Image (tube, helix red, strand yellow):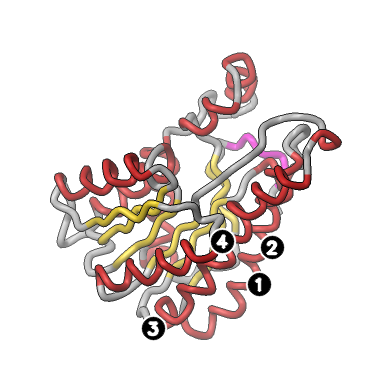
Amino acid sequence: MASVEGRLAGRAALITGAGRGIGRAVARVLSSEGAAVAIAELDPVRAEEAAQELVARGGQSIALPGDVGDPAVCEDAVRRTVEAFGRLDILINNAASTAGMKPFEEYTDEEFMRTYSVNALATFRLMRAASPHLRRSPAGRVINFASGAGASGGAHQFDYAAAKESVRAMTRVAAREFGPDGVTVNTVCPFADSEGVREHVDASVTEMMRRSVPLGRLGDPELDIARGVLFLASDDSRYVTADTLWLDGGAGSVRS
C-alpha cells in the first residue's frame, strides 16, 4: 500500500525498464514510500501491468511504453511524467540491453551500438531532458544503473561492460554539474537474481555467480536492491553524490 506519509511523499519518479525485474521492484518500493511513479518500459503489456499494480496498491502511476534507445521516446517520457504528476524529482535509469555473452571479436557494430544506445545514450538523453525539472526540485535525484561487469572487465561481456562503465563516467560528470542546484547523481551496481540475469545466463553460471558472493546468495530485487535505491532516492542520502553503491553482497573485486 502506498503511503502518503512515506519518505518520498509528494515526489514523482521516472523509472526506465520498470516493467519487470529490478526496475519493477524499485517501482514498488518507491511507490510504497509515497512517490508517484512513471513506468517506462519497452513491452507495453508489462508497462501497463506494472502501473496498474501500483494503482491497485493505492499509489499513483502511469505506463510509458516505448524503446528508450529512441531519442524521441526519452524526451516524451520526461514530458508525460511532468504532465501527469506536475513535477519530476527522481530519475532512475535502469533499462538495459545486451547482445549476450561471447568473445569481443564476435560483436557486430550494430549489436554494440544497440547496447550502447539503450544503456548509455538513453541515460544521457534522459538526464538532459529531465535536467530543468530536477534542478527545480527541492530534492532532485538521479540514480543510474551500471554493472560490476564494466568495473572489473567481465570477459565475454564487451558491449555491456563498455556501456555500463560509460554510465559511471557520465554519472560523475553530471554530479558536478547538477551539484550547485542540490541534485545528487549516483550509480548503483547490483548483483541480483533477476529476470534479466536468468534470461542471459544459464543455471550453471548462475550457481558460479552465487558462490562468488561472500553473503552466499544473489540479491533479492526488492529486499536487497530496491531498498538501496530507496536510500539514494530519499533525504537520507542528501550528502551522497558522484558515488557508486555496490549492491552485490561483496562479490565485486573493484571498488573505485
Amino acid of disc 2: Ala
Amino acid of disc 1: Val
Of residues 225 and 201, the one drawn nearer to the viewer in this rendering: 201
Residue shown at the point (50%, 56%) measured from the top left: 93
Q: Is residue 42 left or right of residue 248?
A: left
Give the CA distance from mark 4 to mark 3: 20 Å
Give the CA distance from mark 2 to mark 4: 11 Å
Q: Looking at the image, is mark 4 or mark 3 earlier in the sequence? A: 4
The residue to which callout 2 is attached is 169
The residue to which callout 1 is attached is 173
Magenta span of residues: 250-254
Q: Is mark 4 on a helix, strand or loop?
A: helix
Q: Do the residues labelled 4 and 3 touch (CB within 8 Å)?
A: no
Give the CA distance from mark 3 to mark 2: 24 Å
Residue shown at the point (43%, 64%) measured from the top left: 91
Q: Is mark 3 on a helix, strand or loop?
A: helix
The residue to which callout 3 is attached is 136
Q: Residues within 10 Å of mark 1 (few under 14, many from 20)?
A: few
